[in-house]
Image: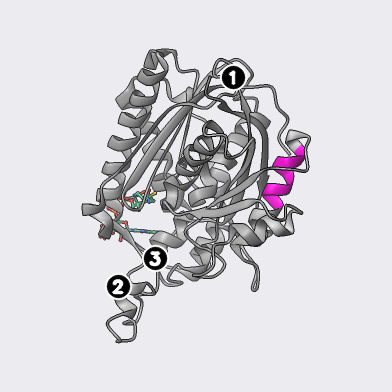
Amino acid sequence: MTAAAVLCGLGSWLPDGEVTNADLAAQLDTTDDWIRTRTGIRTRYVVSPGEATGDLAVEAGRRALKSAGTEHADAVVVATSTPDRPCPATAPEVASRLGLPDVAAFDVAAVCTGFVYALATAAGLIATGAAGSVLVIGADTFSTILDPADRTTRAIFGDGAGAVVLRAGEPGEAGAIGGLALGSDGSRSELIEVPAGGSRQRSTGRPAAPGEEYFAMQGRPVFAEAVRRMSESVEATAARLGWRVEDVDRVVLHQANARILAAVAARLGIPAERFVANIDRVGNTVAASVPLALGDGVADGELRPGQQVVLAGFGGGLTWGSAGLVWPELTPA
Ligand code: COA
């Protein structure tokens, strides 16, 4: 029988630098009221000068290994769109710093869907026997690519890292990842992008125009796509697992906007109370969003062993994806 990837460890890490809505209102033309009512966010955390995505990834990864009661993983997959450097990937150095020399290590780039894509990749490594255990880390430092003058993106995004350990197990076990459903629509890539800094701009030989090196997003169409794609994704995962949507106990969506969570709940006909939410405390942490929500969901008593749980992400690409599991016994670190 093909081995299933079973969740057995969970770790979270946030940088020290808190930026409250009041802090933003002191710098930009915005208010605490606008940010809270339009996004549900109260605060977020950002890295200090010199601190990078890999530093957050190491801390979250260390905690996930501790939570799993192990010091070893056969592979490290880092989901990020803000790697420490354009080349090489961030994962090999993270693996080395975690005391995991010689293991397979690589990055997955799917922006806010990165963690779900990395989970699917890790499940594939386990199913093929290429790895018996995988450390999957979602880590991003979007504060390093935001336009300091952009009140919208600065209100939404925060930095952070979340990680899980997957081990080979049986498909019927609590914690076994199943119902994976992934998708993309590259015809709409311009809705979420950093226009400059890649080969498309660099090969022209012209320097980047002012501001092109910053992250840019078209909020309204992204909102609509996020609601549609994550709703359809949750339905697809439930169907693949043979669950009725109304029997899903907890939904853990990418934390993009509290109004997106509410809209997906309404569209699916699932009570909003079943949606795990920590966006008020951390903002949109991109690839770290889903694993940080898992950690806070357990800490808040929202995620409990035996529940049928669906995770879903949506982000740049455009990309989306989802997975389901029966929540296992574990203690996050
Ligand atoms: N403070 C005050 N006003 C702001 C603001 C801020 N931080 N950001 C935008 N505004 C203003 C706009 O300039 C606009 O003003 P105008 O009406 O005078 O033009 C007004 O608020 C409404 O802007 P709009 O973009 O229509 O607001 P919205 O209700 O769609 O909310 C987002 C904007 C970005 C919060 C929302 O569209 C969103 O969450 N989109 C999805 C983002 C996302 O999920 N991104 C990541 C994908 S993974």
Q: Is residue 300 left or right of residue 179?
A: right
Identity, as a three-letter code, of the amino acid under mark 1: Glu
Disc 1 crowd, CA 10 A, few/some/many (<14, 14-19, 20+): some
Identity, as a three-letter code, of the amino acid under mark 2: Arg
Hey, which quadrant is residue 48 in on the image?
bottom right
Q: Residue at x 48, y 23 (%)?
A: 274
Q: Which residue is mark 2?
A: 200
Q: Which residues are magenta?
A: 59-66
Image location (x, y in percent) of residue 87 = 51, 70
Q: Is residue 317 left or right of residue 131?
A: left
Q: Residue at x 73, y 44 (%)?
A: 63
Distance of label 3 from label 2 (alpha carbons): 16 Å
Q: Which callout, 3 or 2, points to the residue nearer the camera?
A: 2
The label shown at residue 170 is 1
Q: Residue at x 50, y 49 (%)?
A: 287
Image location (x, y in percent) of residue 284 = 48, 50
Which SS class for mark 1? loop
Distance of label 3 from label 1 (alpha carbons): 41 Å
Identity, as a three-letter code, of the amino acid under mark 3: Phe
Q: Which residue is mark 3?
A: 215
